[in-house]
Amino acid sequence: MPTEFPWQDPALALVIGYLLGSIPFGLLLTRAAGAGDLRQIGSGNIGATNVLRTGRKGLAAATLILDALKGFAAVWIAERYFGGTGVMAAAAAFLGHLYPVWLRFRGGKGVATMLGIVLALHWPIGLIYAVVWLGLLAVFRISSLAGMTAAVGAPLSAAFFAQFDLVLPLMALALLVVWKHRENIERLLSGAEPRVGKRGRNGASRADA
């Protein structure tokens, strides 16, 4: 049923998407568990990989799942209640995660949130995304490499499945993921990027994605 104001559904999708995406689960979980301020640990990133640097594998897994779920939820709610505005909600949730207003626009790098988004938009793309991400992570133990490769592969998967309306939006998200990993790229090129599970001097797992 059309709404009285044609801009209402897109506006709600954008606002709800951003608010969901901007929930800093990594920061909230580590504080609740007494692990300190995540922004003062490791890379200072609020994502699951930096949570792993606290040595709390359970918290890292929970952060990954919740960051993915918020992306999924934003798209699902928009598609269900706001006139098929899923792509708009996806973009808003992703930007909310990367640039949350509550943290002075210093958020995560988007890999887990993008997983939830692509699963909600077209689950076969999400399945390939997860296989590429976790598969490369298992083989090379380099979180940034695995995450960026999965993100860049998403628009290619969309084209493969003939979801051409998703190619450009997913390409934009992938470019943002790569941009947020620019420091990781420098370390990859110099051979200095840490591997997941490698122990630092303080005994915590080192990783940065």
Image (spheres, rainbow, N blue to C red):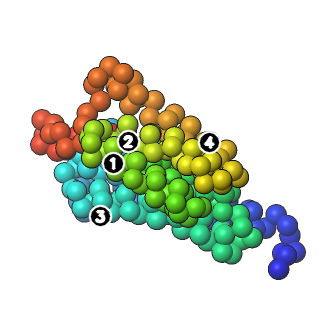
**Tag 2 residue:** 146
Residues marked 2 and 4 touching at CB (< 8 Å): no
Disc tally is: 4
Residues marked 2 and 3 touching at CB (< 8 Å): no
Label 4 crowd bin: few (<14), some (14–19), many (20+), radius 10 Å:
some
Q: Mark 1 or 2 closer to N-term?
A: 1
Amino acid identity at mark 1: Gly
The residue positioned 34% from the left and 25% from the top of the image is: 187
**Tag 1 residue:** 135
Residues marked 1 and 2 touching at CB (< 8 Å): yes
Q: Secondary structure at mark 4?
A: helix
> Distance from label 1 to label 4 (Cα)?
23 Å
Amino acid identity at mark 4: Ala
| Pick the front one: 52 or 126 | 126
Tell me the tag on residue 172: 4
**Tag 3 residue:** 32
> Distance from label 4 to label 3 (Cα)?
34 Å
Q: Position of residue 121 (x, y in %)?
A: 59, 61
